[in-house]
């Protein structure tokens, strides 16, 4: 009976994901149905509504054949290893630890990453284990090195969904001295670097390898001039590992504003005449996905808060029952009253044990639902990649307009030279000068077109990868969440069964 309930829960949850407007690239899953796992959490029976409507969402449309491969236990941090279709990882493990405070040399400024008014900064020890038994390498980096890395990666991989780096808060000068802030920054930097390393393209970047393995300062990034790109990548605020108590849902509350800030930080792209209908459909779908993730994030926050309120209330009940048992024992005048006080005390202990178990359960809920928030945060990277495309197209269109104007001017000069023989030489010089300018503009347009096409291809590849990983991660999230709920439900049932057995004597007396 217990196994049937998770199956229904997972089926309902999967049907609710219809609003995510998934692409249809997973139609090949139908051919894998016969050989796929019969795990009810991965492939629950379709609902009656879905069976009666061929257009309705069914779980088969959500999965592909390789979605049934063994998956690691859900975790707040994404694994370093890329997907099966990606190149082998360069880095096996990355950790950020041991923050140290340094005095800023004379002449330093805010541009150097110094905390305003503090005259000091922190460095972080980054330990990287190379894949294939390559050993460990250790380097120390400050936050401005991370900024330089992010700028380089954004310029080198336009059109890719490059993970956004942790934000440098405007209040940093006031809070940086707090130990918890420094610890959160360590966690945020580690998450960021692990995400970079897990990316199938960025993870093989020479810039990332230099950052992780070569000692010495990282020079600030100087973009090529003229720079028409407006993508900003410093939008991801730290999401720390969940703790007990109120901190359990702190990560949910801050993430919504983080995403808003990250999207606002990207200047609105120019209005482009995009004619790729497939891309426009994907773009609209991602906008809908962002809204769905935002709404789901709010509900996840509400769930964790309610669970934490229940945990806190249960704990208070247990403590008051302990006090009640103590009062009963002190006021007891016979053995039966003392036994009743003992039973109340045992019941109070069970309530407290339940409260402590709820702390672990809530932590697991945060861990499993973390995929929602990670993908909501990833929408910042998606927005930046699409902005790269918009800016590139706008640049091509601007050069095309300039070329049209140059050709028009050249044509007018050639016409006037035919009518005005007295200024033939000067007109000829102007025409030749314009022709040279036109050749340079045509070369610039060709370069811009190549970059635009490259960004388009990057967008296409990333959209496919994003959808595939999202399908897999959401199935892992659903399965992990349901299995965890079943496990703790069994634990709570066994606990209260034992209490019921111990107090059965009172039930018999009542009957």
Image: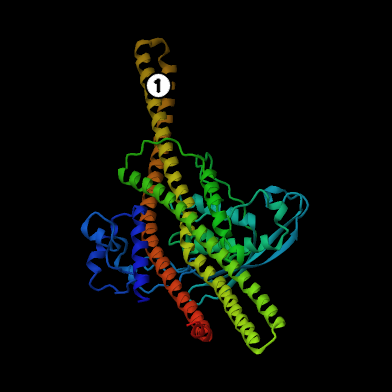
Q: Is residue 27 left or right of residue 87?
A: left
Is residue 76 visible in the rendered image? The answer is: no
Please provide percent x and percent y for residue 133: 50, 77
Q: Position of residue 398 (x, y in %)?
A: 42, 33
Reply above or below: 212 against 163: below
**Badge 1 density bin: few <14, some 14–19, many ≥20, Cα 10 Å:** some
Seen from this angle, which residue lies furthest right?
Answer: 106
Q: Is residue 280 left or right of residue 91?
A: left
Vertical arrangement, residue 439 with respect to residue 409, above or below:
below
Quarter of the rendering containing residue 332: bottom right
Q: Position of residue 312 (x, y in %)?
A: 60, 67
Residue at image position (40%, 29%) is 401
Quadrant in the rendering for residue 466: bottom left
Question: Which is nearer the eye, 305 or 100?
Answer: 305
The residue that label 1 is drawn on is 409
Element class at badge 1: helix
Write the residue at 46% across / 75% down: 489
Q: Is residue 164 visible?
A: yes
Where, by quadrant of the figure, is residue 388 drawn?
Answer: top left
x, y (%) of residue 333? Answer: 70, 86
């Amino acid at each position: 009976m217990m196994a049937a309930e998770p199956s229904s829960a997972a089926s309902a949850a999967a049907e609710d994901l219809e609003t995510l407007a998934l692409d249809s690239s997973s139609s090949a899953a139908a051919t894998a149905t016969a050989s796929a796992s019969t795990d009810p959490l991965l492939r629950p029976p379709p609902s009656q509504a879905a069976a009666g409507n061929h257009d309705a969402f069914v779980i088969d449309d959500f999965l592909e054949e390789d979605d049934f491969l063994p998956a690691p236990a859900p975790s707040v941090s994404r694994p370093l290893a890329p997907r099966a279709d990606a190149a082998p990882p360069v880095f096996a493990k990355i950790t950020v630890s041991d923050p140290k405070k340094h005095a800023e040399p004379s002449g330093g400024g805010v541009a150097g990453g110094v905390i305003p008014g503090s005259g000091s900064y922190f460095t972080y020890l980054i330990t990287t284990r190379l894949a294939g038994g390559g050993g460990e390498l250790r380097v120390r980096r400050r936050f401005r090195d991370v900024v330089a890395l992010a700028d380089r990666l954004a310029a080198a991989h336009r059109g890719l969904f490059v993970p956004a780096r942790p934000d440098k808060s405007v209040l940093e000068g006031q809070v940086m001295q707090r130990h918890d802030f420094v610890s959160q920054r360590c966690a945020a930097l580690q998450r960021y670097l692990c995400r970079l390393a897990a990316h199938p393209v960025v993870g093989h970047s020479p810039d990332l390898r230099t950052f992780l393995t070569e000692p010495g300062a990282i020079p600030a990034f100087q973009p090529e001039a003229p720079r028409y790109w407006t993508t900003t990548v410093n939008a991801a605020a730290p999401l720390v590992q969940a703790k007990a108590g109120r901190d359990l849902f702190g990560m949910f509350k801050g993430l919504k504003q983080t995403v808003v800030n990250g999207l606002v930080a990207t200047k609105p792209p120019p209005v482009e005449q995009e004619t790729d209908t497939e891309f426009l459909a994907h773009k609209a779908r991602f906008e809908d996905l962002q809204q769905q993730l935002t709404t789901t994030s709010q509900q996840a926050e509400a769930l964790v808060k309610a669970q934490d309120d229940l945990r806190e209330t249960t704990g208070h009940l247990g403590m008051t029952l302990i006090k009640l048992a103590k009062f009963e024992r002190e006021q007891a005048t016979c053995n039966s009253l003392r036994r009743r006080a003992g039973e109340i005390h045992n019941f109070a202990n069970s309530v407290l044990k339940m409260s402590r178990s709820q702390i672990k359960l809530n932590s697991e809920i945060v861990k499993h639902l973390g995929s929602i928030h990670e993908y909501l945060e990833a929408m910042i990277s998606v927005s930046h990649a699409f902005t790269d495309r918009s800016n590139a197209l706008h640049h091509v269109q601007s050069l095309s307009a300039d070329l049209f104007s140059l050709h028009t001017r050249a044509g007018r000069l050639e016409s006037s030279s035919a009518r005005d023989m007295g200024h033939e030489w000067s007109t000829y010089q102007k025409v030749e000068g314009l022709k040279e300018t036109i050749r340079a503009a045509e070369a610039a347009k060709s370069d811009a077109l190549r970059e635009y096409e490259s960004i388009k291809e990057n967008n296409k590849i990333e959209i496919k990868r994003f959808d595939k990983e999202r399908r897999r991660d959401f199935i892992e999230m659903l399965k992990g969440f349901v299995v965890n709920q079943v496990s703790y439900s069994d634990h709570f049932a066994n606990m209260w069964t034992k209490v019921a057995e111990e107090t059965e004597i009172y039930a018999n007396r009542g009957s």
